[in-house]
Image (cartoon, rainbow, N blue to C red):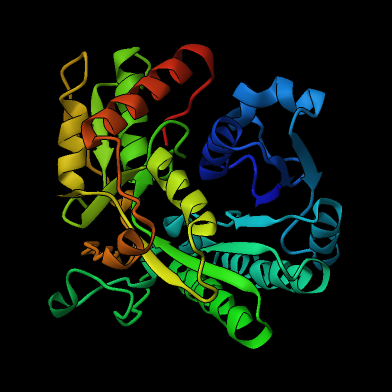
């Protein structure tokens, strides 16, 4: 069996690589742009160099030819589409790039699959951000909740989501779509709230910044999962009685406000800390009430989260402590 993962060097994709190497005998192909950072793949670098079940294909979602070439080279049995411009706040200052990468890029990939490997099982990674600002009457959020995207990123993921469904319905591709809630852990990008909190704590512990943790909106509600549970869910999605055109919410068990995540991380700190509101960290509009009904996916696959919220936060903070010791880290 062969798998093609888009955005191989990304946070989620790198954990998916770890999972597939440990739990399958599949060969793994991954797309990366030629100048993408390789930090997240450090643990499998030797295997990549030896071409031991992992091969990198240089490609760009916005280049239709390169996506066709990637599918043609790999001829995958399974495709995990994880590459994206994935930062909601960044999308407010780069909306054109966000829409081009996420919508046109997904279209290019699906066209390539349709033309080169139409029997592949395909996972299109949408986002819980498509629901955006949700009326209380729709809580917990089911897959039938109306879309109310609260950022250009979320708008682009609506397009990604609908394209996945369209290619299943119109062309018979074996596409399934996931809307994953907040998922975090080691390697999480520092533009996301919980990871920037952990990074600042690690920097403060190392006396590289003042012991002041800067934050934006703390009142939005999130449902937190571990990335390692997320990639297990994605593998299960494509291998456990897959249903073409299926759309699923996936999320963890721990519901809390962003402020709770901050206080929980601060409780793990080795130094005394204070907090400071930073308006530059606030989105113009925020997805405010991310609480999900995941009955559909759990009933269909039997998946459930295994890693506790407390372990996820500890592992995230330990990741940043290690990074601060070995790398040049700028506060962001």
Residue that appears at 24% across and 63% down? 292
Residue toward you, 74 or 108: 74
Which residue, as the protein is rendered here, is positioned at the far front? 241
Visible in this render: residue 30? yes
Q: Quadrant of residue 180?
A: bottom left
- The image quadrant of residue 138 is bottom left
> Where's the C terminus, which quadrant?
top left
- Could you tell me residue 305's position as x and y percent? 30, 44
Residue at position x 28%, y 49% in the image: 252
As drawn, 247 above or below 122: below
Which residue is painted at 32% across and 30% down in the image?
198
Residue 73 versus residue 148 in the image, above or below: above
Q: Is residue 270 above or below residue 251?
A: above
Rendered location of residue 245, percent (x, y) = 52, 76
In the rendered image, residue 84, in percent from the top left (x then y), is placed at 58, 57
Which residue is rendered at x = 63% and y = 63% of the image?
121
- Would residue 209 be seen by someone viewing this image from the given angle? no
Front in this rendered view, residue 106 or 73: 73
Pick the front one: 103 or 145? 145
In the rendered structure, the answer to whether residue 185 lies left or right of residue 100 reads left
Q: Which residue is farthest bottom?
A: 170
Query: Is 144 displayed left or right of 112 in the figure?
Result: left
Horizontal and vertical percent position of residue 295: 26, 65
Q: How many marks?
A: 0
Instruction: Examine the image and state in which quarter residue 66 appears.
Output: bottom right
């Amino acid at each position: 069996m062969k798998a093609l993962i888009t955005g191989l060097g990304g946070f989620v994709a790198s954990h998916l690589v770890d999972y597939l190497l440990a739990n399958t005998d599949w060969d793994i192909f991954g797309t990366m742009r030629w100048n993408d950072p390789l930090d997240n793949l450090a643990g499998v670098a030797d295997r990549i160099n030896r071409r031991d079940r992992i091969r990198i294909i240089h490609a760009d979602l916005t280049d239709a030819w390169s996506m066709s070439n990637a599918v043609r080279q790999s001829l995958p049995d399974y495709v995990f589409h994880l590459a994206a411009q994935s930062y909601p706040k960044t999308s407010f200052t780069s909306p054109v790039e966000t829409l081009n990468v996420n919508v046109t890029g997904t279209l290019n990939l699906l066209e390539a699959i349709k033309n080169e490997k139409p029997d592949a099982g395909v996972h299109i990674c949408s986002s819980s951000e498509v629901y955006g600002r949700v009326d209380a009457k729709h809580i917990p959020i089911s897959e039938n909740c109306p879309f109310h995207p609260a950022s250009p990123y979320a708008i682009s993921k609506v397009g990604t989501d609908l394209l996945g469904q369209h290619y299943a319905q119109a062309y018979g591709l074996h596409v399934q779509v996931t809307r994953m809630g907040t998922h975090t852990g080691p390697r999480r990008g520092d533009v996301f709230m919980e990871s920037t909190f952990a990074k600042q704590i690690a920097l403060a512990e190392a006396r590289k910044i003042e012991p002041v943790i800067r934050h934006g909106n703390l009142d939005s509600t999130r449902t937190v999962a571990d990335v390692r549970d997320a990639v297990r869910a994605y593998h299960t999605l494509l291998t456990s009685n897959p249903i073409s055109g299926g759309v699923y919410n996936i999320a963890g068990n721990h519901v809390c406000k962003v402020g709770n995540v901050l206080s929980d991380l601060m409780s793990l700190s080795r130094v005394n800390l204070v907090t400071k509101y930073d308006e530059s960290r606030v989105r113009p509009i925020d997805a405010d009430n991310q609480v999900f009904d995941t009955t559909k996916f759990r009933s269909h696959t039997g998946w459930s989260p295994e890693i506790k919220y407390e372990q996820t936060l500890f592992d995230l903070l330990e990741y940043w402590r290690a990074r601060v010791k070995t790398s040049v880290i700028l506060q962001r």
